[in-house]
Amino acid sequence: MLVKNLNNLPRDILRLFSQIGKIAQENNCRVFVVGGVIRDLYLGRENFDFDIIVEGDGIALAKILADKFKAKLVDHEQFCTAALFMPNGIKIDIATARKETYEHPGALPKVTPGSIEDDLLRRDFSINAMAASLNPEDFGELIDFSDGLNDLKKKVIRVLHDLSFIDDPTRILRAIRFEQRLKFRIEDHSLKLIKEALKHHAFETIKPPRIWRELILILYEKSPKKYFMRIAGVCDLRFIHPKLRLNRDTLRLFDAIDKLLVSYEKLYPHNEPVENWFLYFMALTDALKRSEIKYLAERFNLKKDQRDRLYSFKNLNRNFFNFLGKNNLQPSQVYVMLEHLSYETILILRAKSENKIIKKRIDDFLNIYDKVKLSINGDYLAELGVSLDSGFKKILDKIFYKKLDGELQTKEEEIEYARKLIDNQ
């Protein structure tokens, strides 16, 4: 049976797959495109993550293909994997077909060369364990050893063996991610296996950074609130942090971020892109104390800039909100309060606040104050005789704040005020 909708792939991709199949055949290999792209062809979903499995020497074939297509090759011979970066921007991951064994629960798998059947049956769920042949004699033929197509039709997520969640507990999070993204359901036996794995404290058998990688993938999903509600229902959230819960305020914050991100480009058309996933992570952990956030950051080995953003948000206390919501604040006062914060921190402040004055001030900061530039600079002050060590930054700041507050309109007025400040030093 041919893979449904294969011809829906872009023509250049189909042509490329056909060429890869012919080159593989000439080199006595069998090749298959596998996984999510096959699943999504049946579901009518766009997917340009191309994974190719080789029965034979995957690295050797990748080198031949790189030479043929003038592609950049990045190989990892110890893992029998390679990535081709094609001149047209397409990336193709290539791997030798392999089988896996787990020495103990939660261990990374031991990998040895295998057949396409071995490779597909080592995968997480039946719907991700389908492939299409690329060799000329059976191009497009569906390979489905685990009845994944039937599970697609039934809209269920099913693991391939009973120890799957014990061997790799991150599959629990992946099952929920696919369930929620595709609007499927985890089939009853697989859900029972999840519960059994959790009884044996499955998440404690793997290193926290592996959990973190799966959480990031969930946070990247559109509107991840429902994902975490499902996780909380199946697993509880204590595997992330012992004190982490989904309360009403957290759920409201998720909704507020959803709404804000939908209109972000319209509200703030000239601002930099933000990391949406990190906004949701800040929302998820909003109820945790600073010390608990620090524990979480260390446990998941967060990058320094991620830690800094979390800590800066946690450092904002009730006094900050009270002051930002005061009547008659000057633009310069708002600027001083917000300019050292990341965009993500500022946006979650807006999402969290129900105070219209605060929302308006954040909007003004992002759309107006943060775009204001002086006409003069430090070089000009140096020409006036101000030395680097005499505090010319303070002078520029004072000029800038006056301009923000509307008291300086022209370059000449900036110069005049600069001279006045210098004379009064």
Image (cartoon, rainbow, N blue to C red):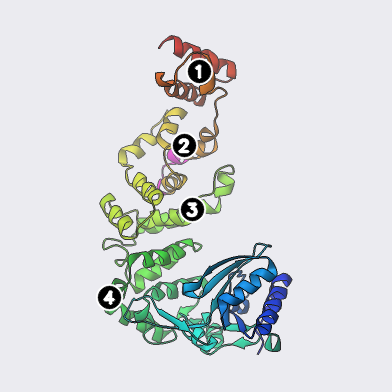
Q: Is residue 220 above or below residue 424?
A: below
The earlier-in-sequence mark between 3 and 4 is: 4
Report the residue at 50% width, 84% height from top. Answer: 119
Query: Is disc 2 in contact with disc 4, using a CB cutoff of under 8 Å?
Result: no
Instruction: Give the spatial CA distance, label 3 vs label 2.
Output: 22 Å
Report the residue at 27% width, 52% height from top. Answer: 289
Amino acid under disc 1: Ala
Q: Which residue is mark 2?
A: 361
Q: Which residues are magenta?
A: 352-360
The earlier-in-sequence mark between 2 and 4 is: 4
Asked if the magenta segment contains residue 181, the reply would be no
Residue 101 at what x, y percent from top left? 39, 83
| Front disc: 3 or 1 | 1
Report the residue at 57% width, 20% height from top. Answer: 409
Q: Nearer the viewer, residue 173 or 368?
A: 173
Quarter of the view holding residue 339 = top left
Label 4, residues with CA under 10 Å away: few <14, some 14-19, many ≥20: few
| Front disc: 2 or 4 | 4
Asked if the magenta segment contains residue 357, the reply would be yes
Residue 369 at what x, y percent from top left? 51, 33
Q: Which residue is mark 3?
A: 275
Which mark, by number, is residue 382? 1
Q: Which residue is mark 4?
A: 201
Quarter of the view holding residue 321 = top left
Label 3, residues with CA under 10 Å away: few <14, some 14-19, many ≥20: few
Position of 143 with respect to 291 (left or right) is right
